[in-house]
Image (cartoon, helix red, strand yellow):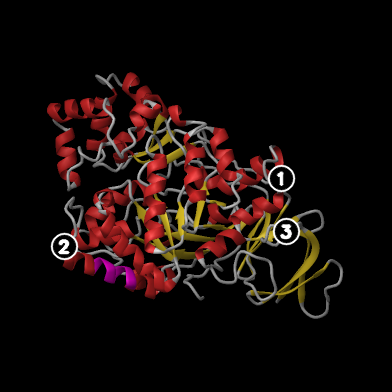
């Protein structure tokens, strides 16, 4: 069966002005792109009249924490297709499911649960080959690839230890990076703010990052700090990229903390634009971020094993120590309790049913409602009762700063979706891409539609080396969206976070109709790797 999309206003992913074109799909490829009304209707063909509609490449979400959900969740792909997402990359923020070792795998899975969801012991991904092989056994609705997390590499070699790599351990870590890149990872990701990566030295990072050079692949990095330490953190990672000689993407680039709004982001941009490194950034179109609440603990408070940290939190002495530390500034670490306050930190997910009553409310509200001594007391009780697996939403950004990042010529759209909660996730899981279209291109007109489309398609494909996707061009894979930009809506918000987006009339994945109006039509996605 061939498919002809007729008379659509085609935004081809390049950022050029749209043109009325016909698009002929044969098999999994775009066979022809012609002036509207000139394509042949001969033979067995399905015709879709796209008059008055936008036709774009399928959107690419290069930052989606769907590593486990893509394998475990039968419904995975519906929320993505409803937004027009046809390709996603997992393994972000240093948090890939692989490489892993028997000695530390379960501890790593527990650590990842607020971001990736509950991971059964049987899902053992020793390396990229075993991870991609498990993905390939699933009927995928969207295309999926992966980055390799340097955090996962470190945990596989030495667990959550704060100590430096020995020479042998560093050699082993570098070997794991090479094996991943040779096996099909699109690049590396790092989470320098997270344990155990926050303890890694400059020398250790340089050794690991130089492994990217022969493959010409990118590092996508969650930097050390995004608040008071934003500028220094950007200097740190751009310096590492320069020295290692690699391309860099700064993940979810933003400025957090009320005292930093309207100032720090501009200084950080100056650092990026004066750097000799090849740097891009990505962002999500929201003023609230989402993470594990363990990140609210000062690094010096955290023990090498989760059990040790939780045991400390269970004691009166440990909670007094935490109260004291949260009143102080820690160099190189963003104290979000000081920066935004407990009233702007919302509990979004709980690992145990008994704690689900706390979700959807701020820590300050929960403290008052349930009669805890103070916020530290509630916070400690929650983490201990949840085994450290609690997720949170931090209302930490200013809309004007987000707009500034969105307007940068080298910024790309992501969702940074977490899959740790079924009941109260961040709304970006269900609505990031339609929200960007609606708010930035249609309503507030901060960006032209063609620029907005490029930030979700061709620019991302180019940056991460995703071959023959991200553009409407002859010979490219037929990942295509058809919609009216005026009707695309993100239904999810903070009060109702579980709600599919609307407005996508048709979504094609690899030439097959994958979404029509309100429902998924099949599983046409593929496992991707560089060169395929």
Residue 319: give x, y in percent of width and height.
Answer: 18, 28
Please report whichever mark, 1 or 2, sits nearer to the chain's N-terminal start: 2
Does the magenta-highlighted stretch encompass residue 402?
Answer: no
Q: Is residue 468 above or below residue 307?
A: below
The quadrant in which residue 171 appears is bottom left
Q: Residue at x 73, y 58 (%)?
A: 16
Q: Is residue 428 above or below residue 247?
A: above
Q: Is residue 72 above or below residue 437?
A: below
Q: Residue at x 83, y 79 (%)?
A: 42
Residue hosting label 1: 487
Q: Is residue 400 above or below residue 454?
A: above
Disc 2 to disc 3, how far (Cα)? 51 Å
Residue 349: give x, y in percent of width and height.
Answer: 37, 40
Q: Residue at x 26, y 21 (%)?
A: 372
> Which element type, helix, strand or loop, lies under badge 2?
loop
* Classed neighbour count for the residue bearing mark 1: other residues with Cα under 10 Å, few (<14), some (14–19), many (≥20): some
Disc 1 to disc 3, how far (Cα)? 22 Å
Residue hosting label 3: 16
- Badge number at residue 404: none
* Classed neighbour count for the residue bearing mark 3: other residues with Cα under 10 Å, few (<14), some (14–19), many (≥20): some
Residue found at the very far bottom of the displayed protein: 43
Residue 184: give x, y in percent of width and height.
Answer: 42, 72
Find out whether the residues at labels 2 and 3 contact each other: C-beta distance under 8 Å: no
Please report whichever mark, 1 or 3, sits nearer to the chain's N-terminal start: 3
Magenta range is 172-178
Which label lies toward us, 1 or 3? 3
Residue hosting label 2: 166
The quadrant in which residue 124 appears is bottom left
Find out whether the residues at labels 1 and 3 contact each other: C-beta distance under 8 Å: no
Report the side of 517 relative to 274 (left or right).
right
Residue 121 visible here: no
> Which element type, helix, strand or loop, lies under badge 3?
loop
């Amino acid at each position: 069966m061939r498919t002809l999309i007729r008379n659509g206003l085609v935004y081809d992913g390049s950022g050029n002005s749209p043109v009325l074109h016909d698009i002929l799909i044969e098999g999994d490829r775009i066979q022809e792109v012609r002036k509207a009304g000139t394509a042949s209707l001969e033979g067995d063909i399905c015709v879709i009249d796209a008059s008055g509609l936008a036709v774009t490449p399928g959107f690419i979400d290069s930052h989606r924490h769907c590593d486990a959900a893509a394998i475990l969740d039968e419904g995975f792909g519906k929320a993505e297709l409803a937004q027009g997402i046809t390709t996603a990359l997992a393994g972000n923020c240093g948090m890939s499911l692989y490489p892993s070792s028997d000695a530390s795998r379960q501890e790593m899975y527990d650590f990842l649960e607020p971001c990736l969801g509950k991971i059964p012991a049987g899902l053992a991904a020793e390396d990229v080959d075993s991870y991609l092989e498990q993905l390939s056994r699933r009927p995928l609705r969207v295309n999926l690839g992966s980055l390799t997390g340097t955090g996962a590499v470190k945990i596989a070699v030495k667990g959550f230890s704060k100590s430096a790599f020995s020479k042998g351990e560093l050699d082993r870590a570098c070997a794991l990076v090479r094996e991943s890149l040779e096996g099909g990872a699109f690049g590396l990701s790092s989470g320098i703010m997270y344990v155990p990566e926050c303890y890694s030295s400059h020398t250790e990072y340089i050794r690991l990052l130089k492994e990217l050079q022969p493959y010409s692949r990118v590092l996508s990095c969650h930097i050390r700090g995004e608040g008071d330490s934003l500028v220094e953190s950007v200097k740190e990672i751009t310096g590492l990229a320069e020295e290692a000689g690699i391309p860099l993407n700064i993940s979810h680039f933003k400025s957090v903390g009320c005292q930093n709004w309207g100032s720090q982001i501009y200084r950080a941009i100056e650092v990026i634009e004066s750097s000799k490194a090849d740097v891009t950034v990505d962002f999500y179109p929201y003023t609230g971020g989402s993470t594990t609440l363990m990140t609210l603990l000062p690094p010096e408070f955290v023990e090498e094993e989760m059990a040790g940290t939780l045991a400390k939190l269970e004691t009166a002495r440990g909670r007094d120590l935490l109260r004291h530390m949260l009143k102080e500034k820690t160099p190189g670490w963003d104290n979000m309790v000081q920066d935004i306050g407990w009233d702007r930190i919302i509990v979004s997910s709980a690992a145990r049913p008994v704690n689900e009553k706390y979700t959807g409310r701020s820590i300050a509200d929960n403290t008052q409602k349930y009669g805890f001594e103070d916020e530290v007391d509630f916070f400690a009780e929650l983490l201990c009762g949840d085994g450290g697996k609690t997720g949170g939403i931090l209302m930490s950004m200013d809309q004007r700063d987000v707009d500034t990042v969105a307007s940068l010529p080298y910024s790309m759209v992501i969702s940074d979706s977490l899959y740790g909660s079924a009941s109260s996730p961040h709304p970006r899981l269900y609505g990031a891409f339609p929200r960007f279209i609606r708010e930035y291109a249609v309503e507030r007109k901060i960006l032209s539609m063609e620029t907005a489309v490029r930030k979700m398609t061709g620019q991302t494909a180019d940056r991460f080396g995703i071959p023959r996707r991200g553009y409407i061009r002859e010979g490219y894979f037929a990942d295509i969206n058809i919609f009216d930009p005026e009707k695309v809506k993100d239904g999810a918000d903070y009060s109702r976070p579980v709600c599919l987006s609307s407005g996508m009339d048709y979504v094609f994945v690899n030439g097959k109709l994958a979404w029509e109006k309100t429902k998924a039509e099949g599983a046409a996605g593929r496992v991707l790797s560089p060169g395929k």
